[in-house]
Amino acid sequence: MNDHIHINITWAKEKAKTILLSRKKIKIGVAAAVGLVCACIIIAIVVSTRLLEENNNLNAQVAAMNLKLIETTQESQNYADRVDDLLTQNSSQTATFDSEKEVLVNQTLAEFNERNQLIENIMKSLGVKIQKHTPTANSGGPYLPTSQSLPADLLLRTDKNLNMLLYTPLGRPLAGAISSPFGNRDDPFTGENAFHTGVDIKARRGEPIKATATGTVVEASYNGDYGHLVEIKNGNGFTSRFAHLQSYKVKVGDKVKRGQLIGLVGNSGRSTGAHLHYELCLNGKPINPAPFMQTTNLSKILASEEIQARTPKKKIASSGKLKQVTTPKTSKMNVKKLTVASVKTKKKASPSAN
């Protein structure tokens, strides 16, 4: 019985129970308990160490993220400052651009107006009536103050003037001296006083003749005293005639432009020698072509800064004469008021069409 231990357990009401344990079992139990406790302690130490390492790693990551956040915040602030600088520069540049644009537009409008005025002065001096737009019935639209409608009005005015120039005979049909002017003269055949409906330009036979304005050919045939004749109906009431030709380079119905070849110099019809009889009619009446022939360099006049500078100083007489227009290079062009013949043009049997 020395290898066993008796354990007596007494309950209420004097009941008792005896537990018999061997020493060997007790030792095994104690060893097992101690081993379990040691194992738990070891596991706790391992887990704690692992958790501590993970916590340190997390703390390091958090610290790195905080540093990155600080750097990102600083970069964001730098970008924000840069954006503010760019916006400020853009506002400044926009204001400068708007200012420069306004100056440029005003200069352009001023130049347009100046050139339009010069064109109109020249055309008035030639006797070309400038038609002004007048309101008509059955019209309307929104009202715009003058300051807002000025550019559009100026563009319309420019378009009208350019169209007027396009269809107005300007310049010379060919080079050469005028051998017989427009108006009263001694007839080359009879010696008697007669009225010459155009100007005669001395030239060699076969020299090219060019149209002086855009228009439509209404005649290209032999026409009595005119000989071989080309007649072009231009716009604005103008008709241009080219007589005594050797041959035609156009036919009836052709659309021609200023500077286009229309025929060759000849000596046909009532003529004393090779020349061109150049005739202009306005609303069916012959007019003096000389002032129109002196506007050969009109485009140069309009483009000349010298003329632009002098334009405001020029004065137009009440009679409609243009006192003086100077070409960029030199020559003075004294434009005389257009003389309109009192007789209507006759296509045939004109005694002074040579």
Image (cartoon, rainbow, N blue to C red):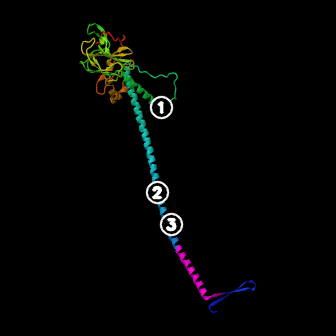
Query: Which of the 4 quarters of the picture holds residue 283?
Result: top left
The residue labelled by disc 1 is 148
Query: Which of the 4 quarters of the picture holds residue 331?
Result: top left
* 3D distance between C-alphas at marks 1 and 3: 71 Å
In the rendered image, the vertical position of residue 345 relative to residue 95, given as above or below: above
Q: Earlier in the sequence, mark 1 or mark 2?
A: 2
Q: Which of 121 and 210 is in front in this view?
A: 210
Q: What stretch is highlighted in magenta?
A: 20-47
| Residue type at tag 3 | Leu
Query: What's the residue at 53%, 75% (across, down)?
Result: 45
Foreground mark, 1 or 3, reads 3
In the rendered image, the vertical position of residue 224 relative to residue 160, given as above or below: above
The numbered disc on residue 218 is none
Query: What's the residue at 56%, 81% (across, down)?
Result: 35
Task: Please name the predominant secondary structure of the magenta segment in the image.
Answer: helix
Q: Can residue 348 be seen in the rendering of this structure? A: yes
The residue labelled by disc 3 is 58
The residue labelled by disc 2 is 74
Q: Nearer the viewer, residue 256 or 213?
A: 256
Quadrant placement of the N terminus: bottom right
- Mark 2, Cα crowd under 10 Å, few <14 / some 14-19 / many 20+, is few
